[in-house]
Image: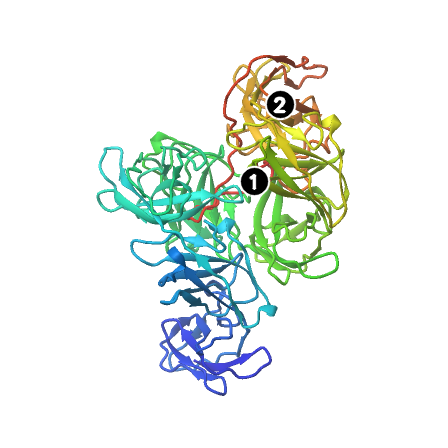
Amino acid sequence: MSGTVVDAAGKPLRGICVYANGGGSATSDDSGRYSISGVPAGSYPVQFTDCNPVPVYVSQWYRNQSDWSSAEPVAVTEGVDAPLSDAVMQAGVTVTGTVTGTNDKPVSAIYVNVNPRGSGPSAGTQTDKLGVYVTQPLPFGDYRVQFGDSNQPAIWANQFWTDQLAWNNATVLTLQASDGPSRGGVDAHLSAGADVSGTVKGPDGQGVGGICVSAAVPASNGGWDQVGWASTAADGTYTMAGLPPASVKVDFRDCNPTPLYIESWYGPAATFDTATAISLNAGDHRRGVDAQLNGGIAVGGTITDSDGVRIAGINININPANGSGPSGWAQSAEDGTYRTSPVPAGDYRVQFSAQTPNPVWATQYWKGEQSWNSADALTLSTTDDPARLGVDAVLTKGANVSGTVFDPQGAALGGICVNAEVATANGRDQVAWSTTASDGTYTLSGLPVGAVQVRFQDCNHVGPYLPQSWKNRDGPQAADVITLTAGQQQTGIDARLAAAGAISGTVTDTKGAPLGGICVQATTDTSFGGMTRTTDDGSYEIDVAGGGDFHVQFVDCSNSPKYSGTYWKAGPDPAKAAPVTVTAGGTAKGIDATLSAGRVSKLGGKVTNSAGAGVTTACVVAYLPDQYALFSRVQADGSYKFAAIPSGTYALGFVGCPGGSDGDVTGTIADPTSSTARYQAEWWNGVPLDLDNSPNGNGPDPIAEHANLVTIGSGRSLVGYDLCFGCVDGTPPTPHVSRNHPHHRPHPRPRHHRGTGPATPHTSVAASKP
């Protein structure tokens, strides 16, 4: 196996190590030539790595591929030489820095991993005795840097650059040509690690080995991230070290080859949101974090292609159809079979996906559906114990869509979120996502056969730039359709994003203390503008459309709301809200607010059909357009109630919840007393609601749809917010106010979790996300 290694200009490169995985290795000479002799017959992925004392070139795989999964294997026949085409190496940037600990002393043996935000090569190394590290060269682009203690047990807490707890909160490191051959100063100062220990038992009270234990913290994307992990010994005991000084939640998952027990969070609890938090300080030793796990039902089957060839390495996720509760996971074996971790009896949707940087197979759901909203529910009952088998899938080759994103002047834009969506009878669904590299390019892989639409949104807030659909459309409904066939490589799906504006300020209490977790919402008279939450120092910045007058509302949507909502310079009355003028590409600064103490309120009503029967297939959503939401189920008598709403101005949406869900809603509602009657979702009071009418793909826009907004004061009790589906002339009674003052904690809708564990949850575009 032989060839030549050159740089981008065609100059031969010396000192490049060439590895034929399992077949031998060689190093290029002054002429760039290399030769690996005695290679056995077989198929080999071939890697090229700069092994010079001061490496300059980025590692790659044969035919200039960035990772092993996309490398083209080299076939070797017995007794026949295998000449390879030239390997063209690209110059990159090394990352270097110093890691210190207590008293700023250098710390050795710390793992440093530099990983791309999307797909592409990564680099790992360790600090030396002076606390210094230097990575292999990396391509230009955006990365996150992780620091972990290699000691067993860990002495220092894991963290990300700069002083962040987890992946989703980590500061992005951008490597570019102006850095030269090396980017220095990527330093870290570590805290002493805390540890948590306990015992995990089964239903019989005996210790259980092989249970994966992980610690998680909330992530900036609304999900959660792992910050520590361990595994139980045969007697069920574990110790999880190297944890950061933070409030963590602990998860217990059966990782045995044939798992028997249902995943549980410490509490016990079924989800991250409902788990009991454990507050840790640097160096803490927390004992007695125990768990008792219950048995459940596994799901099993076989994955094949259309020719019946079995497929290995496919991830299978089973998620509750109602959006909350334990989920199960597995990966298909070499013979295509799988068996998931157990879950409780109930309704589930099953996802089959190839979780690789460039998946060959299109993601699909049981039975053969392309998205979450169109998927059939799999019902598991106690009669299926211990496993429901025969849940098979026949996969099709996935299509790719690629392109480049530019700013208004035509410069390439990195850090832009690109989503592929499909339309279903139950609303729009996201089926793939990617982030543009520093040169503005992106690829969406593993797309289903059929019609998709592509959406671009500034996920880095680096512009800011307005969301846009291809081709240069303002909303997801206006997006041009791209019709894909199996395995198609569709290029040229480009976008030029328009400049947006921004609003910024600070929120404090009446004593001047900063308030974190406050929702800040900007709207115009005709549409939703944007929403964000304040950080711990009370500051915020919202990206909004490129110019105009906005009304800014502040609502305490934290987990324990204590303050009354207000508009900028206007108090709680939206009619008196002072306009904030924003120019395209500019920022309106100093839009501050002072919140006074207040109490949560409650609101209720009835949802019935024309015969007076309760529409139990519906639920009611209190939106702060268009993201933060509270949910209430409709009971058998038609009644619903929000027990605790922070004071503010909301839109009430009456939508479908077909699986008893508080997490995934639909735009149509089936009548529970009729097999044929179906109703369109509505705003109160009788205004049509379109789940797809969204400025950014996250949820409906009640302002654009002329919904009747409801202003809720502090500590009030509102009743009579009724709606009758199928009524022609029915007029809901006028709501009235009572003097009851509840003190309940609100329950905002849980977000889908995106931790670092194996389970990858679905993402539903139709449902708004708090």
User: Callout 2, which amino acid?
Assistant: Ala
Q: Is residue 568 above or below residue 151?
A: above
Quarter of the view holding residue 111: bottom left
Q: Is residue 84 above or below residue 421?
A: below
Q: Which mark is residue 677?
A: 2
> What residue lies at 74% left-to-right and 36% top-to-bottom?
524
Residue on which disc 1 sits: 764
User: Is 62 on the left or on the right of 39, as rendered?
Assistant: right
> What residue lies at 67% left-to-right and 51% top-to-bottom?
482
Q: Secondary structure at mark 2?
A: loop
Residue 297 point in image, percent of width and height: 35, 36
User: Callout 1, which amino acid?
Assistant: Ser
Residue 463 point in image, percent of width and height: 67, 53
- Disc 2 to disc 1, C-alpha distance: 25 Å
The color scheme shown is rainbow
Quarter of the view holding residue 574: top right
User: Is 682 on the left or on the right of 644, as rendered?
Assistant: right
* Nearer-the-camera pick, 590 or 453: 590
* Nearer-the-camera pick, 137 or 724: 137
